């Protein structure tokens, strides 16, 4: 595919330098020209981009690919295909696999599987051995393989002393710790947000404080050690306020929110439907508004999917027994676009949160030696998405590329579609269909 010639014609190019109408010529895996009215070279494949934004591919900081260990829910191959269909050209695979990504051997296995995938697959390593929260994982060995983010996601590191040591090692290695903020002593036994709806339904809740206590603690540890932190899937207005204060202080803190937390509330649980069970849980309308405003104000740096496939049998269980998590890769762009244009953001502002800002947090931006999220200019790697902000489509779970079906958007009509995705110069998605 490397010598394939593509002309992406008639769109509006959007990247971190701004917006302009223009065609994009791709040859041999790289962008070779950008400009209005480019001629079609002989033998070129033309991708129509009329009414579309042509942007650097989306970058997901938070994808559960389930391999190794839970291949009935997802594999690197199927998750990457779902990503490409969602406009992503890179994902960061979370380490809560079985076995977890807490050693160079498992990290190498996932990276190797990723080499054949239809998007770039970076991995996050575990902070602690087995994600058990007791002993540090070999961060140095993992960093030597190119791992840039470390997290015990699915669980927060409970022990503050251990977390301090993790920050000290991470700072020395130049890598970033990404925290799943959840204090177990406050959250344990909860299945949804603790509030009006959990009381009405008689379901044990997870208070906002379970998240905020750990956000506050880690900010204190960043202040102590000087090492950076990235906060995963923040869900409460209090967390946004803590991050804003830390940022004003000049601390190296970044934060992501998930599309579902920008658009759904705990009222979705009214029918005890496990499809809406997720961790952190869907919160209040006030929290949704605070997360949206955090995105608009630049306090939140990225929107990340927390794509969490689960087999149908698992999600068919009663609310208290079903695992938390929902699919996100194929719906992130329209769901985020709707939530954030609602608070006055432009599509370009939304793309900053979905592409170039997460690319930097993952260490994948061209400024850092990577090939993701960079300006659409001649010479750059051709990792691109072509997005139609006005197209509508209805989510049919059986038509999603994921091996799992646990989308909360089943049957809903969304505005915003992915027309094409180009990965390393190859059109892996054209006219909304995966090519391999
Ligand atoms: O809802 C969630 N599902 N939250 C997490 O932190 C983990 C994830 C999973 O792995 O299923």
Image: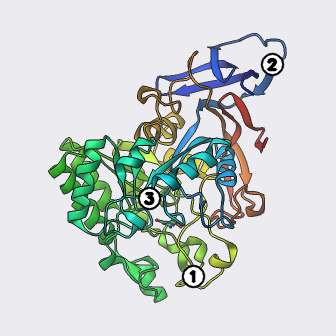
Quarter of the image where one finds residue 281: bottom left
Which mark is nearer the camera, 2 or 3?
3
- Mark 2: which secondary structure? loop
Which mark is nearer the camera, 1 or 2?
2
- In contact (CB < 8 Å): disc 1 and disc 2: no
Q: Residues within 10 Å of mark 2 (few under 14, many from 20)?
A: some
Quadrant location, the N terminus:
top right
Instruction: Please name the residue shown 20% across and 64% down the image.
Output: 161
Quadrant location, the C terminus:
top right
- Residue 397 lies, in percent from the top left, at 73, 63
Q: In the rendered image, which residue does mark 3 sit on?
A: 102
User: Residue 224 versus residue 115: which sits nearer the camera?
Assistant: 115
Is 301 situated above or below 48? below
Quarter of the image where one finds residue 422: top right
Tag of residue 272: 1
Q: In the rendered image, which residue does mark 2 sit on?
A: 44
User: Residue 329 versus residue 23: which sits nearer the camera?
Assistant: 329
């Amino acid at each position: 595919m490397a010598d394939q010639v593509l002309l992406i014609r008639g769109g509006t190019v959007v990247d971190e330098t701004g917006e302009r109408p223009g065609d994009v010529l791709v040859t041999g895996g790289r962008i070779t020209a950008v400009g209005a009215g480019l001629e079609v070279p002989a033998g070129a494949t033309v991708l129509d981009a009329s009414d579309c934004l042509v942007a650097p591919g989306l970058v997901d900081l938070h994808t559960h690919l389930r391999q190794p260990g839970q291949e009935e829910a997802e594999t690197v191959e199927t998750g990457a295909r779902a990503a490409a269909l969602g406009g992503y050209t890179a994902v960061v695979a979370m380490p809560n696999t079985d076995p977890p990504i807490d050693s160079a051997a498992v990290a190498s296995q996932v990276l190797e599987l990723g080499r054949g995938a239809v998007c770039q697959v970076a991995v996050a390593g575990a902070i602690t051995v087995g994600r058990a929260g007791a002993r540090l994982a070999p961060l140095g060995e993992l960093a030597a393989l190119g791992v840039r983010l470390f997290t015990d996601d699915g669980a927060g590191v409970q022990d503050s002393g251990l977390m301090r040591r993790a920050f000290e090692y991470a700072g020395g290695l130049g890598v970033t710790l990404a925290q799943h903020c959840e204090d177990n002593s406050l959250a344990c036994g909860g299945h949804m947000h603790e509030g009006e709806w959990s009381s009405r339904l008689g379901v044990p809740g997870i208070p906002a404080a379970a998240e905020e206590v750990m956000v506050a603690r880690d900010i204190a540890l960043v202040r102590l050690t000087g090492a950076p932190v990235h906060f995963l899937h923040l869900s409460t207005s209090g967390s946004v306020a803590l991050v804003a204060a830390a940022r004003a202080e000049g601390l190296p803190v970044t934060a992501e929110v998930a599309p579902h937390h920008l658009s759904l509330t705990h009222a979705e649980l009214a029918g005890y439907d496990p499809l809406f069970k997720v961790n952190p849980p869907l919160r209040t309308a006030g929290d949704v508004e605070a997360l949206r405003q955090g995105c608009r104000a630049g306090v939140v740096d990225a929107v990340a999917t927390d794509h969490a496939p689960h087999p149908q049998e698992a999600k068919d269980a009663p609310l208290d027994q079903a695992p938390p998590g929902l699919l996100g890769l194929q719906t992130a762009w329209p769901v985020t676009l709707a939530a954030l244009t609602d608070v006055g953001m432009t599509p370009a502002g939304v793309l900053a949160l979905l592409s170039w800002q997460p690319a930097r947090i993952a260490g994948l931006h061209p400024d850092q030696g990577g090939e993701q999220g960079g300006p659409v200019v001649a010479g750059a790697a051709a990792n691109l998405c072509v997005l139609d902000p006005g197209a509508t489509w209805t989510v049919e779970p059986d038509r999603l590329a994921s091996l799992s079906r646990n989308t909360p958007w089943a049957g809903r009509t969304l505005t915003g579609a992915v027309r094409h995705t180009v990965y390393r110069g190859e059109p892996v998605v054209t006219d909304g269909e995966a090519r391999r």
